[in-house]
Image (spheres, rainbow, N blue to C red):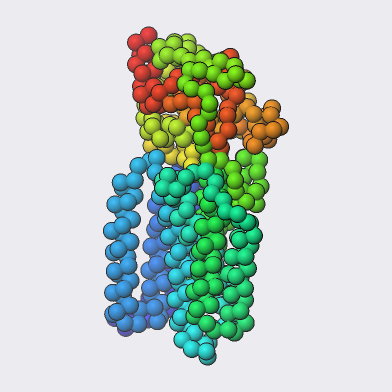
Amino acid sequence: MVLATSFLQDNNFIDALYILAVILFILGLRGLSGPQSAVRGNKIAAVGMAIAVAATLLKKGVLPDGETLLLIVVGIAIGTAIGIPAALRVKMTQIPQMVALFNGVGGGAVALIAWAEYRRRFPGADGDWTLKAEIPSLFAAIIGSISFWGSNIAFAKLQEILPGKPIKLPGQQLLNLLLLVVAVGSAIALAAGVHSQALFVLGILVAAGVLGNMVVLPIGGADMPVVISLLNAFTGLSAAAAGIALDNFALIVAGTIVGASGSILTNLMAVAMNRSVPSIIAGGFGGGGELPAAAGGGDADRGPVRSTSAQDVAIQLSYARQVVVVPGYGMAVAQAQHAVRELSRALESKGVEVRFAIHPVAGRMPGHMNVLLAEADVPYDQLKEMDEINPEFGRTDVSLIIGANDVTNPAANNDPGSPIYGMPILEVNRSSSVIVLKRSMSSGFAGIDNPLFYDPKTAMLFGDARASVSAITSEVQSL
């Protein structure tokens, strides 16, 4: 028994477990690069995390007494009791909110770990915390706190507890700068030897927490996918810093992987919107709203809006050679993904080629549309990214837009005065015919009008997306 315990707690054995965990993390992340391998990637990463946790618990001094073990077991039990039911019950339309919350929990955990380490290392004025461990821990406290509170605001906006439109205060940028100075200044003072519990809690955690709120509040719903990705990167970076402070190899690598992948994704999505990350953080873009034109009406400057019926849409789709479906957040809200899959099957049975056009920022989180369509068993090879599908619109007979607004707005290409000018879009206006499924003439989350709705080749089918798609499917099947 003693030999077994000695072997399990051997540093070389624990390092080997960490290396195995890291390899599984990397393989898991690689699996997440494609829809077909995503589930397997998640399982591989979960096994890696289980191994990393076990290796950490085996380290000498981690479990010095039964009380510590009890606290760990209670913590795992509480997390399991909350996490599993929440994951099972969450609706697919609420996945962005869940991602924001789970990401925030990671950042908050890092901030609390940094605080606990500070209390443990500095019970008085004569602590033994080296700068090598103290500086990354202070960095983790700031970034983790920003991520936690910022993710909570993102959740509240996505859940519509807070308005999706930008919420700004007078002197917003100056206030943010002041909060950042207070947080960083407190960290510098602590690293310089001012051992103050109040300075850590108030100067770092509180100032960084308020800053997290203030940074996300002015950001509109149109930028929310980028914000979620950015906050995810923040959580990863804070975890990596905590790993350095705790000398935990697995935490360093896992945090670095999350931080790096989140940063790359944030940049890719910002490029997809033709906006810089600093301009997104500055906020003020997106929030929705109603257009003056009523359903079926028109706009004096734009021209009339042409309404259509499910029967007419079914005829157009049934006699098309190629149909491109463009899903957006409206499809998610109506939970129409399964109805859309049934429509695609009905069209394919008539020899129609059906493809799905996916914009990088469609929905409220990265990959939102991919997740919904995968749930409905849409074949992965039918999902086409923007760069791949745009050349196809020129030979597309019908583009069927389901709740996608801003990502199909041609003003991004031809109106220099538009807030989204220069943003790459799905060029559905090049199709022979365009059909838009919407509840009303309301604008998208960017809060701007869409000239596509007034294009003579565009027809609007007003109503709930799921009911409209089901009606179209019935008509297609009856032809």
Instruction: Determine whether, in the image, residue 57 is placed left or right of residue 123.
Output: left
In terms of image quadrants, where is residue 71?
bottom left
Horizontal and vertical percent for residue 226?
56, 47
Horizontal and vertical percent for residue 233?
55, 56
Instruction: Determine whether, in the image, residue 354 is placed left or right of residue 392.
Output: left
Regarding residue 383, the answer to whether it shows in the image is no
Q: What's the residue at 46%, 35% (across, down)?
A: 329
Q: What's the residue at 48%, 83% (across, down)?
A: 121
Q: Nearer the viewer, residue 391 or 16?
A: 391
Q: Is residue 390 above or below residue 458?
A: below
Farthest front residue? 170
In terms of image quadrants, where is residue 45?
bottom left
Horizontal and vertical percent for residue 216?
54, 53
Q: Nearer the viewer, residue 55 or 152?
A: 152
Q: What's the residue at 54%, 65% (across, down)?
A: 208
Q: Is residue 217 above or below residue 70?
A: above
Horizontal and vertical percent for residue 197?
49, 80
Q: Quadrant of the N terminus?
A: bottom left
